[in-house]
Image (cartoon, helix red, strand yellow):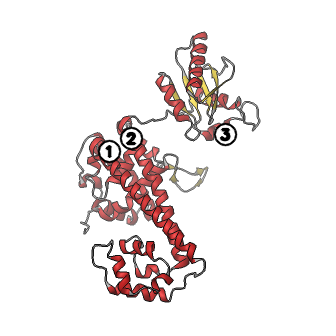
Amino acid sequence: MIVGVDIAKKKHYARAFDWRGIELDKTISFKSRYQGFQDFIGWVNEVSSKYCKDKIIVGLEPTGHYWYTFAQEILAQGHMIVQVNPYHVKKAKELDDNSPSKSDRKDPKTIAMLVKDGRYQIPYMPHGLFAELRKANNLREEWLVKSWSIKNKVHRWLDTYFPEFTDVFKSWEGKAALLTLKEIPLPDMIVKLSAEEIVSMWRTEVKRAVGLKRAQELKETAMYSVGVNEGTEMAFYEMQLLMKEYHEIRTILEDIEMRLEELVLITIPGAARLLEIKGIGIKTAAGFLAEIGDISRFNHPKQIIKLAGLNLRENSSGTHKGLTTITKRGRSRLRAILFRAMLPLVAKNAEFNALHKYYTSRKENPLKKKQSLIALCGRFIRIAYTLITRNAEYNPVKVLGGLAVVAAPIAA
């Protein structure tokens, strides 16, 4: 028996069909609560018993996060649950009535028919340590976005009220710079103080000696600043709020990353093997393992490449042959983690640096730099799969794969 379920926030709709597509019972609705789930299970058992169906597949269209609790209940009952692509549902809903209409009665049937035709995938729901790791990594990514947001706001403030600030401080995230932004961020406030007073303020929190020369430079720069000098009272208040939020976010991020490191180093098997690769840090290893989950569920690294959306797609028709690109159909966060990891890996790891130079300079089909990085992401997945599944040591010679490439040592 195939049950198609249309997931919503508060109320779900379901319809039951046999393997030929014949409907077995009327449409039902049930709430996304304990009693609603019990009503659904009772209905499924009643219909399956009535029509002698001992195998049940529940299909759904993943709608945001609302399907998590329902899927957990179905799996707890021992039934198989599958997902259909929302894009397929959108395109297939006109097959029955040639109408673009969308309704609570129509969608469950469309979902069930896609499942009947085998157009579904089995969702992976991490358990135990991998569930903890994925949640921790998701939290880190969410707070990183907040961190980038607050940094952009600080940049905007500086560009408006004190654009010369970064001429004095290379980074506004240094201790002395942060203290300056907290206490005297506006040029008018700096000009009123002597260089000695500024140095004295810095030394309340900065342990190392901060030179008088830097304070004089800051004072002279503030004197000739072209920053906006209207609305400065509220601008000062705004910077205080930004600094408070920045410190809070940074504290939370550090706590999350500490928990993430504990999970990876202590409990996740295979993580230590990834860290043997020069250029791969704890955060990259944690993000990679969090996104793929239990790596033993894959039979081949190509499956992970496809999961990341890094598999190639061809654009050709007849005599026309278009560009070959990656599909980008998969976990975008995994793809982003891999690409961000590849930049320091190419810079610090001799083998990956040599491969990158080879890919971009070979005589036949040389790749552009970004294409080479994408290709190296796939190579990294293959290497990581081998290291973890076989518990093998990282071997620089095998990384080069027999290519006529010599890995030159990279200075630290």
**Placement of the C terminus among the 4 image quadrants:** bottom left
**Residue at image point 47% right, 24% down:** 76
Residue 175 or residue 236, whichever sits in front: 236
Q: Quadrant of the N terminus?
A: top right
**For residue 244, side relative to residue 350 (left or right):** right
The amino acid on which the numbered mark 1 sits, given as a three-letter code, is Leu
| Quarter of image, res 87 | top right
Which residue is label 3 attached to? 90
Is residue 269 visible in the rendered image? The answer is no
- Seen from the viewer's position, the closer of residues 286 and 337 is 286
- What element does badge 1 sit on? helix
Q: CA distance from mark 2 to mark 3?
A: 34 Å
Q: Secondary structure at mark 3?
A: helix
Q: CB of mark 2 within 8 Å of CB of mark 1?
A: yes
- Residue 263: mark: 1
Image-based side of 7 in relation to 136, left or right:
right
Q: Amino acid at mark 3?
A: Lys
Crowding around mark 1 (Cα neighbors within 10 Å: few <14, some 14 to 19, many 20+) is some
User: Badge 2 is on which residue?
Assistant: 132
Is disc 3 surrounded by few (<14), some (14 to 19) or many (20+) residues within 10 Å?
some
Mark toward the start of the polypeptide (2 vs 1): 2
Q: Name the residue at 36% across, 53% down.
A: 255
Specify which label sits upstream in the sequence, 2 or 3.
Answer: 3
Is tag 1's residue or tag 3's residue first in the polypeptide sequence? 3
Question: In the rendering, at what x and y percent does residue 301 appear?
Answer: 38, 43
Structural distance between the alpha carbons of marks 1 and 3: 40 Å
Q: Nearer the viewer, mark 2 or mark 3?
A: 2
Q: Position of residue 25 (x, y in %)?
A: 67, 17
Q: Residues within 10 Å of mark 2 (few under 14, many from 20)?
A: some
Amino acid carrying label 2: it is: Glu
CA separation, marks 2 and 1?
8 Å
